[in-house]
Image: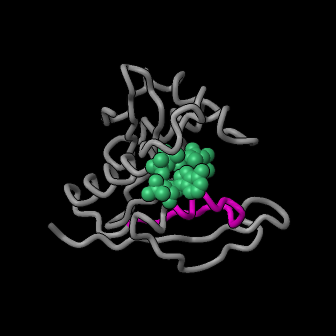
């Protein structure tokens, strides 16, 4: 697995993965906005043999990284890609003086929550109806030790 920064030229591949992963995928403009955010935009992707197989998008806010999206192509799941992307996010934070990562995940998304817990995230709250009526979100956070 090769990890690198996401670029505007990668958006077609990111969008293809997004559409395979979510019932309500982000539109292209949302990817453009995330990747073109300049200094505060954080876009990391994973490749296998030159193919994009997963990505993570977020935004640096003061000393925090707000994680907005994480997705792995269904054919490449269960192979450590998600873990690798979260590890890359940790490294990004350490090298950019970001001390905490925050994210929301649907409460019924047990697989993602297991991944976050395995990477040292803790659940710190619930956001009622965050994903629509009756679909609550769980707020997770991870504190990063300085290097
Ligand atoms: C959640 C997601 C990113 C995980 O990616 P992945 O590359 O398959 O994850 P990994 O292979 O790195 O697995 C890491 C950990 O996640 C958990 N996990 C992954 N797949 C799992 C499964 N099918 N069942 C249970 N736990 C699972 C395990 O804790 C695993 O650690 P382990 O291998 O030591 O047991 C992927 O399933 C995905 O893209 N889902 C759809 C989009 C989504 O839900 N994104 C998160 C939104 S908040």
Q: Is residue 124 above or below residue 93?
A: below
Left or right position of 62 against 105? left
Task: Say how many tags the image has.
Answer: 0
Q: Does 4 lie within the magenta span?
A: no
* Residue 31 picture location, percent across and down: 54, 35
Most foreground residue, 36 or 146:
146
Q: Is residue 143 above or below residue 59?
A: below
Residue sticking out furthest to the front: 79
Residue 104 sits inside the magenta stretch: yes
The quadrant of the picture occupied by the N terminus is top left
Q: Residue at x 31, y 32 (%)?
A: 2
What residue lies at 53% left-to-right and 76% top-to-bottom?
123
Q: Which residues are magenta?
A: 101-114
Q: Position of residue 129 (x, y in %)?
A: 77, 68
Between 46 and 34, the one nearer to me in the picture: 46
> Which of the 4 image quarters holds residue 37?
top left
């Amino acid at each position: 697995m090769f990890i690198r920064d996401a670029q505007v030229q990668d958006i077609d591949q990111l969008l293809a993965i997004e559409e395979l992963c979510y019932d309500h995928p982000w539109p292209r403009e949302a990817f453009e906005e995330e990747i073109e955010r300049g200094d505060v935009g954080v876009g990391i992707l994973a490749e296998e043999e030159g193919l994009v197989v997963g990505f993570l998008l977020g935004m640096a806010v003061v000393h925090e990284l707000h994680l907005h999206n994480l997705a792995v192509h269904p054919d490449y799941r269960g192979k450590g890609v998600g873990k690798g992307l979260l590890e890359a996010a940790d490294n990004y934070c350490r090298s950019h003086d970001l001390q905490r990562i925050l994210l929301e995940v649907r409460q019924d998304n047990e697989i993602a929550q297991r991944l976050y817990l395995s990477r040292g995230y803790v659940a710190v709250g619930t956001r009622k109806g965050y994903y629509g009526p009756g679909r609550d979100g769980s707020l997770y956070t991870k504190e990063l030790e300085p290097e």
